[in-house]
Every structure is written in structure tokens, then in C-alpha cells.
Image (cartoon, rainbow, N blue to C red):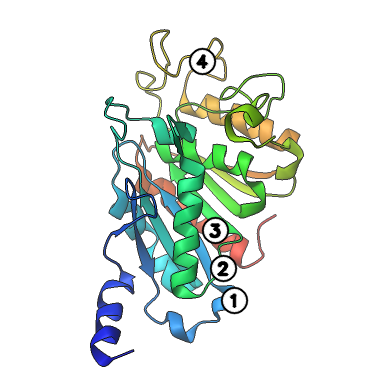
Amino acid sequence: MTDQRQRLFAHYQLGETTIFSAPDNRFSYCLYVPRQLEQENLAGTRLLVAIHGTGRMQTQYRELFAEFAEYHNCIVVAPLFPANVLGDGNLSGYKYLLEGDIRYDQVLLEITRTVAATYGVSDKKMMLFGFSGGAHFVHRFLMLHPHRVSAASIGAPGVVTLLDPAKEWWLGIADTEQHFDIQVDPNAVSGMPIHLAVGGADTETWEITVEADDAYYMPGINDSGDTRLERLQSLKASLEHYGAKVRLDIVEGETHNVAPIAQFSKAFFRDVILGRYS
């Protein structure tokens, strides 16, 4: 590599990177790459995927984990799943992993495969963080691809899918093979470290109550609880029923805000990395 190429790589592909087109160029991603990555044991470098909420503040999610990445040999991957991808004004397609011809789980796996190849690291197991709409994505992704997830932090999702084999997707997992060509094995989450978090004052319900004329309405969709906390508690019970190792943090005094939730998420990921999580 010439000196110029080395300088360009260091400037745009280490630290806070530029924004790259994904293999499916309807989507993009940015990274935080530790500046001393070449001095690290790349076999131990982890990918930490941070999934944005409905507001799509992609770079904010990267920045929340940048310092953590420097100290814990992680590359932060922050995808951008734009709204209105199919021209119909939809804000929520990525949350449910399926929108028209788009499989968002596969979009993410293509992104992480590209990142792994670029930096010479592994994407076989990833840590996942999501808040609000991103938490929708994360908990559904781990159900479909548990073998690709080493740990997951799920912050304040508005609507949850339960590991219920008697209910259709996306209330439960009865017919995932029809939608994704994947039959979810609920027992595959056994032993998985999973972190749930929500603000103690995050009690508004106007955004999370799914009304009958909503495109994502299904009978029973609001039965998991009225508030985000109640719905997280339903998800916790479902995950624990199949053996997941779940931690729930209720962040006192906080409303619907990603930054304080991420502090608890970093503590969780640190415990997982250091082998202290139980």
C-alpha cells in the first residue's frame, strides 16, 4: 500500500469512518474502528452492531459505543435502513425484518460480511444493540439467527415478538419458515446473554399502541402489555422460558432516550466480554 493509500485508509476507515454503501446500495453503514486495530489480536476482535431507532440517527449510535470499542477491541457497525425505501412512506419495515422484497436480516449479514473481509476479522458471532425501533430489529434477528449472536441488548422496543410457537409471525414464531425459510428453534436462545432496558418514566403509549387500521396490526398485538416496560417484561418471560440468561434494567427517571440506556448496555457488554456475566 502506498503512503497516500495508507493515509486515506487511516483517515476514512479508522476511527469514525465515512459512510459506505452496503452491498444492496439502498442501504448504507458507518463504522467505528479502533485506531490501533492493527496492533490488536484480530482473532479476538468483535463486531458490535448498533441498530438505530425510527429517527435513524445512525452516527449517534456509532458514537455511543466509540470509546467502548477502543478499550474492548470492537468494531462498531452502524447500519442505516432509510424510511420510504419502497416509496410508500413506510417508517417501520426494517423493524419486522421483512418489507416487500427486502430481507433486512440478510442486508445486515451482507454488511457484516463486508466489514469482516475489509478488516480481517470474524463476523461469525456478533454483539447486537438496538433501541426503540432498533430493539424491534435486534430481538427478532436473534430469534432467526441465534447462532450469529453472542450477546444482545434490547432497549425499549414498542412492540415485541414472543417465542410462542402457537402464534403467527410477528406475534410469535409459528410460521417463520413461510416468511424467511427459517424455522425458529426457541430452545436456541438457551444460555444466550440478553439485556433488556427501559426508562422508568418511559410510559407514553401513543406510539406503541397498534391500531386496527395500522399496516402491522394483528389481532392480539397489544396483548403483551400497555407500556414498553410491560411489553419488555412479557419478552423477558418468553426468553427465560427457553433458557436465555436475561438481565432487565429499569433506568430510574428516564423517558424514551437512547443515551442512558446505552450506558447500561455497555456495562452488560463489558461483563460479557470479561466473562463476568451470569
Tag 1 secondary structure: helix
Q: Residues within 10 Å of mark 1 (few under 14, many from 20)?
A: few
Mark 4–mark 2 distance (CA, rounded to whole Å): 39 Å
Q: Earlier in the sequence, mark 4 or mark 2?
A: 2
The residue mark sitting in front, 1 or 4, is: 1
Q: Residues within 10 Å of mark 3 (few under 14, many from 20)?
A: many
Q: Residues within 10 Å of mark 4 (few under 14, many from 20)?
A: some
Mark 3–mark 4 distance (CA, rounded to whole Å): 30 Å
Q: Which of the numbered marks, if any, corresponds to residue 65?
A: none
The residue mark sitting in front, 3 or 4, is: 4
200 vs 98, nearest the viewer = 98
Q: What residue is drawn where x is 62% and y is 20%?
A: 168
Badge 3 is on which residue?
Answer: 269
Badge 4 is on which residue?
Answer: 222
Badge 1 is on which residue?
Answer: 43
* x and y, in percent, of residue 171 in the image: 58, 22
Q: Earlier in the sequence, mark 2 or mark 3?
A: 2
Residue type of the residue flagged with mark 2: Ser
Badge 2 is on which residue?
Answer: 122
